[in-house]
Amino acid sequence: MADYYKYQRKRRDLGKPCNFQDSEIKIAGYTVILIPNYVKRNPNHIDLDNIAVYSEHSVNTERVSTGDKVMCHKEGGWPTGIDPMEQQDQNKYRRGFEKDAAFAVAVKELCNTVEKCILQNNQIDLFEEYFLDEESEHQVENLSTKLILFNDQSQGVKRSVSEISWHPEGPIKAAVSYAISRFQQMPEGMLKSSFVWDLQNPNSTEFELETNSPIKNLMYNPKLSDQIGGGCYNGSVAVWDVKKGKQPVLTSPVEKSHHDPITHFQWLFSKTGSECVTTWWDTRKLNEGPIETLNVTEGSNPNDPLFGATVLEYNTEAGPTKFVIGTEMGFLMVANKKPKKNVEITTGYGLESGCHLGPVMSINRSPPNPKFFLTIGDWSAKIWVEDIKTPIMRTKYHGSYLTDGCWSPTRNGVFFLTRKDGWMDVWDYYYRQNEIAFSHKVIAIADQDGIVTLLELCDSLYQLQFREKDVMIEMFDRESRKEKNLEAIKKQQDLMKKVVPKDNKAAQQKWEQRKAELIAEAEQQFSQIVKKDEEVKLDQLDEFSPKGSKTKKDDKKQQPKDDDKQQDQQKGDDGQQQDKQDQQQGDG
């Protein structure tokens, strides 16, 4: 008999009541009209599973029981009858213990155990990190750069960038001057302003520098960062104050300024921060003209020809009164301006050999070693030292003319070069000296279209490498010693050349005598050859004459007599030798 169960619930707990009614037959999913458009498909079987897959793994480790125990350590393991504080008792017990036969056996067993432990300690540790505290001499990394562009705001006319100056407080702002350096190539109505750019906002300029002539060179005042000084195309010098507006606050009169475009502008290290140099100016007296000028010549003679100066280098670490001037002829001049004395040229570099084949475009001193400086000109870059008048190192000739260059402020062996074809080359002398380490194709670092390219270098190009400073100093010192030795050899050769003209007359007389002797020897040899030829000819004639036959017979008759004489002479000599031998035997 089946079991029946009865469930009792209230009506309100059963939900909404169902209301069933009669209606037309309908097919869910599609209508009857669309049935002809469908094709019946063979039945297929699909297995669907929505159960998550799990894995189970269990680990049961052995438990280690731990506990605390106390140990009391005393001096040695001496028996109770021996006082460990008495040395005599200890020695007596040791001697008796060493005489025991079991002592030697115990020592041998202990030796084996100790030897096993020592060998275990000497085994190689597989988990040891051998080069944990060492660094590689040069980081192996793919060199790369990132760039930001600053476009010139002038419309229609493409102006070239002539100078870039960084803000003295850091790489937050940059002042850029624009000009067309080609003679009489400036179109009318060209924009003459230059701009100050903020790196955080490269799409628009932060400040504008207005002037009556295009600015060729400019530089932030390192002591008064609100001031910007610059040289113009018409030869005048101007000073701007960012707080006082776009127009220059000071301008030199045209009649007391340069007669050519200014090629370099440099602030000097002074207490007031008001002195600058294209020639020597004091901005407090800018209307009165320069306080001092210098004619760039090879020597101190005022009649010597003048040379055009293209670039000037000034670094307080190398000397607050020392200036290095690059010329159009490719060599360098050093000027010295001592207090209360006129500026004068003291030394020159490359006057005899080693100068550039074109104008010097840039001079830059090495930040860690100011006595070494880099020059850019023609198709190569050269490294100089103050003690030597010729370059100690130079790069190979590039495929295009070089326009500028500088040392890396953080790495001692890295310097950067820009070429006229739009490439920037990075040389790393710490890595290799014969090839370029990295090249980057840009429109230009500061190109003829007025576009300034800001490059962000990778870590390997600005982080100081292991022992780089020491290695570069050793390299420069080695090359300096080599050049000094070559210079000393050259001086000795020059001295030898100067000594020869003093004894020139005596040497000439010796040469004349020697020449006469050689001529006499040659004539004598020639006369002997002629005589021999004549004798040969006479002998040939005597053979065909009757007199010649008689002379031959006489010669034949004389030959036996001469042979007899020679035999008698040989016998006499042999007899004398025999007498000597007999005498020696008698003495013995």
Image (cartoon, grey):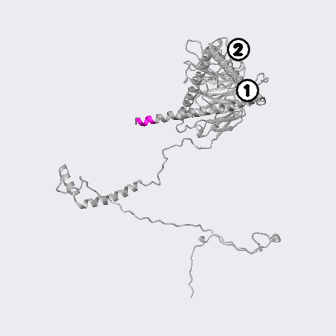
Disc 1 vs disc 2: Cβ atoms closer than 8 Å?
Answer: no
Look at label 2 and name its amino acid: Val
Q: Locate residue 526: give its quadrant.
A: top right
Mark 1 or mark 2: name the one nearer the start of the chain.
2
> Which residue in the protein does label 1 denote?
535
Mark 2: give few (<14), some (14-19) or many (20+) Cα within 10 Å: some
In the rendered image, the vertical position of residue 513 relative to residue 538, given as above or below: above
Can residue 548 be seen by looking at this rendering? yes
Q: Which quadrant holds the C terminus?
A: top left
- Identity of the residue drawn at 56% across and 88% down: 1
Using the image as rendered, state which of residue 390 and residue 523 is in the foreground: 523
Residue 527's disc is none
- Residue sitting at the far bottom: 1
The reply to whether residue 401 is in sight is no
Determine which quarter of the picture holds residue 465.
Answer: top right
Local SS, label 2: helix
Residue 73 is a magenta residue = no
SS majority, magenta: helix
Label drawn at residue 254:
2
Residue 418: x percent and y percent? 68, 32
Q: Secondary structure at mark 1?
A: helix
Residue 212 rendering spot, x and y as whole percentages: 72, 20
Q: CA distance from mark 1 to mark 2?
A: 100 Å
Comparing 170 with 305, the one in front is 305
